Structures are given as C-alpha cells and as structure tokens.
Image (cartoon, rainbow, N blue to C red):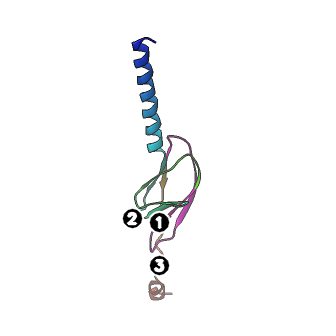
Amino acid sequence: MPKGLVWAIIILFLLLVGLGVFFVLRTGVEVQGAQGATIAVDSKTSPGPFIRLTPGKYTVRISKEGFLAVEQEVTLRWGERILLNVSLVEIPSPTALLEEPI
C-alpha cells in the first residue's frame, strides 16, 4: 500500500473521529431563563444550563426551590442542541396570600 494512501486513510479516520466527538459533546438540552435551577433528565441532573444527552426521547424537568417545576418533552438527534426558554413561576408564601386585600 502506498505511503500517501496510508496517510490519507489516517487523516480521514481522525477527521471522522473528531466529528463524532464534536457531535457527542454538542448533543443535549440547554435551558435559558431559569437561573439557579436544576435540570433533571431520568437519573441525570445538572446544576448548570446545559445537560449532555445521547439521542432519544426525554422528559426534561427544570426545578428550583420556591418555584413551580416545569416539564418538557424533547426528542434529540445526533449533534442537536435543543434550547428551552422557560419562565419559572414563584410559589407565593401562605403569609403573602393572607396579607393581600380582598
């Protein structure tokens, strides 16, 4: 086998591996609008805005103490990064409800 062909195969292999790593590292769900919230998918949790996942169908749960949790169904493909914009709704304290005028 000619030396040039061997190097071409090695370079092509490294490029394909590099692309595969890029797609694996990039695949996941990013959440915006929920500062300090926890992202949970099955048994995986992330304190940050991004959680890395393999392709498939998931229920993403965004929760933060004192706020109503949000759940969203997503379906991920290789290399896809789904962006979820959420607005967490604060749970009013019982005393705040009693203090409001009728």
Secondary structure under the numbered disc 2 in the rendered image: loop
Q: Residues within 10 Å of mark 2 (few under 14, many from 20)?
A: few
Q: Residues within 10 Å of mark 1 (few under 14, many from 20)?
A: some
Residue drawn 51% across the image and 50% down it:
53
Most foreground residue, 91 or 61: 61
Q: Amino acid at mark 1?
A: Leu
Checking the image for residue 92, the label placed there is 3
Side of 57 relative to 9 (left or right):
right
Q: Position of residue 64 (x, y in %)?
A: 45, 69
Quadrant for residue 32, please give it.
Answer: bottom left
The residue indicated by pointer 1 is 88
First along the sequence among labels 1 and 2: 2
Q: Does the segment drawn in magenta span residue 8?
A: no
Q: Residues within 10 Å of mark 3 (few under 14, many from 20)?
A: few
Residues at badges 3 and 1 in contact (C-beta under 8 Å)? no
The residue indicated by pointer 2 is 36
Q: Amino acid at mark 2?
A: Gly
| Mark 3–mark 1 distance (CA, rounded to whole Å) | 12 Å
> Magenta stretch?
59-81
Secondary structure under the numbered disc 3 in the rendered image: loop
| Mark 3–mark 2 distance (CA, rounded to whole Å) | 18 Å
Q: Position of residue 34 (x, y in %)?
A: 43, 62
Nearest to viewer (mark 3 / mark 2): 2
Q: Amino acid at mark 3?
A: Pro
Q: Does the segment drawn in magenta span residue 67?
A: yes
Which residue appears farthest toward the top when viewing the image? Answer: 2
Secondary structure under the numbered disc 1 in the rendered image: loop
